[in-house]
């Protein structure tokens, strides 16, 4: 190498080497109960070590890393939650994403450890990592506690994303939204809150419905949102003029998705619409990063992937829809709208 040759900045490589360590700091702090323990007020290291049953020196390292990541503050030796951790990382918060954090730590962490084999074989890693090959989402609902925790994690993401999704297009002409796989009803309630003339139906598996009723019942629009149990691949779909699929399409391969979209198409009257909430890849798929990493996440744990707007246009037009539009948001999810002619 000549002395005139410029040596590239190694920062992109070094940052990626460190990336998994940052994630694990968050995962461990949530799992150990750091943020819940501090919810009642600040505490010094010795008190926290005793309450969390951790060795003080090692706990101090974790806590100080959380300070660096702005998840905790530290003033004169007293640790306290920051507003972001109080809002998103404490069990008592309705906006918490701890369910998804715990799921990422307990399940996705190990599945991502086999990313190389997922890329080689093009299949999810549940059998390899866990020796389990049943219906994918059955893994989330093996116990009542794990089911609630996973659904609360999805709810936390939904509370962040759904208001942006239902605002991405003017949906005021629609009267009844049917949210397929609507989980805790965050999209349905966001739509009803934005559009006073709209009612909604949350359609999801029977084991999901009790928590959906519990959460929807606490909203200002509970009287306009109903909860119906069913399987959207098999059962008769509720009637509505706008169907929504939020974080559903990315779970399945194109053949299953077209089959589901055709079921929606057949249920709609002319002029009815379908709203898809997923993060859109750029047309050349070189970004954005959130969508790329989520697409790899789908590789290790489902049959699906993230898609670009042209790819959504393809599956929607195959099902019969027209006027496909995409809208990017600043939230974890974008929006795609299409119409039945």
Image (tube, grey):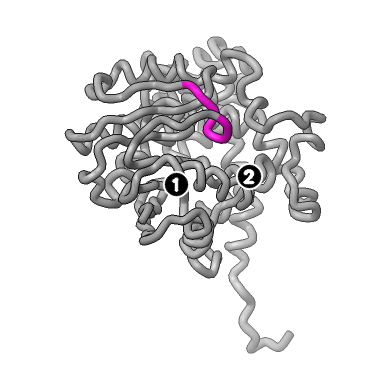
Quarter of the figure with residue 238: top left
Question: Which quadrant of the rendered structure holds the C terminus?
Answer: bottom left
In reply to whether residue 270 is colored magenta, the answer given is no
* Pick the front one: 200 or 162: 200
Q: Compared with residue 263, is residue 293 higher up or lower down, i.e. above or below?
A: below
Q: In this view, does 116 lie to the left or right of 179?
A: right
Question: From where the camera sits, is residue 202 visible?
Answer: yes
Name the spot of residue 103 as percent of width and height, x first. 59, 29
Going from N to C along the chain, the mark reached first, 1 or 2, is: 2
Most common secondary structure along the magenta stretch: loop
- Which of the image's four quarters has the N terminus? bottom right
Nearer to us in this view, 176 or 8: 176
Q: Report the side of 118 relative to 204 (left or right).
A: right
In the image, residue 157 lies at what x, y percent?
Answer: 43, 36
Q: Give the range drawn in magenta.
A: 229-234
* Residue at screen point 58% across, 23% down: 31
The residue singled out by tag 1 in the image is: 265
Residue placed at 34% from the left, 22% from the top?
Answer: 226
Residue 232 in the magenta stretch? The answer is: yes
Residue lying at 57% horizontally and 35% vertically, measured from the top left: 233
Q: How far apart are marks 1 and 2 (CA)?
A: 42 Å
Q: In this view, does 248 lie to the left or right of 82?
A: right
* Position of residue 71 measured from the top left corner of the image (x, y, whole percent): 44, 34
* 84 on left or right of 123: left
Tag 1 secondary structure: helix
Mark 2 surroundings within 10 Å by alpha-carbon count, few (fewer than 14), some (14 through 19), many (20 or more): few
- Mark 2, residue position: 20
| Closer mark to the observer between disc 1 and disc 2 | 1
Residue 141, percent across and down? 61, 21
Q: How crowded is mark 1: few (under 14 residues within 10 Å), some or many (20 or more)?
A: many
């Amino acid at each position: 190498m000549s002395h005139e040759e410029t040596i590239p900045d190694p920062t992109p490589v070094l940052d990626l080497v460190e990336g998994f360590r940052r994630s694990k700091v968050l995962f461990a702090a949530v799992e150990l109960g750091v943020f819940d323990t501090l919810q009642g007020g600040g505490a010094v290291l010795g008190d926290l070590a005793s309450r969390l049953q951790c060795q003080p020196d090692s706990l101090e390292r974790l806590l100080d890393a959380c300070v660096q990541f702005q998840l905790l503050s530290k003033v004169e030796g007293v640790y306290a939650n920051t507003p972001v951790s109080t809002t998103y990382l404490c069990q008592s918060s309705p906006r918490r994403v701890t369910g998804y954090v715990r799921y990422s730590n307990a399940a996705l962490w190990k599945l991502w450890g086999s990313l190389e084999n997922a890329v080689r074989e093009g299949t999810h890693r549940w059998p390899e990592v866990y020796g389990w090959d049943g219906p994918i989402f059955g893994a989330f609902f093996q116990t009542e506690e794990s089911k609630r925790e996973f659904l609360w994690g999805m709810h936390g993401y939904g509370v962040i994303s759904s208001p942006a999704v239902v605002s991405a297009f003017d949906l005021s002409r629609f009267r009844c939204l049917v949210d397929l796989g609507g989980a805790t009803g965050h999209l349905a309630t966001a739509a009803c809150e934005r559009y006073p003339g709209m009612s909604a139906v949350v359609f999801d598996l029977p084991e999901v419905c009790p928590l959906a009723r519990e959460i929807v019942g606490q909203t200002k629009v509970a009287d306009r949102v109903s909860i119906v149990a069913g399987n959207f691949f098999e059962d008769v779909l509720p009637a509505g003029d706008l169907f929504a699929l939020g974080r559903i399409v990315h779970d399945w391969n194109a053949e299953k998705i077209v089959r589901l979209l055709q079921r929606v198409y057949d249920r709609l009257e002319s002029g009815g619409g379908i709203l898809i909430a997923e993060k859109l890849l750029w047309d050349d798929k070189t970004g954005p990063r959130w969508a790329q990493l989520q697409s790899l996440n789908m590789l290790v744990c489902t049959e699906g992937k993230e898609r670009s707007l042209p790819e959504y246009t393809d599956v929607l037009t195959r099902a019969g829809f027209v006027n496909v539009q995409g809208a990017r948001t600043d939230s974890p999810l974008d929006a795609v709208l299409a119409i039945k002619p």
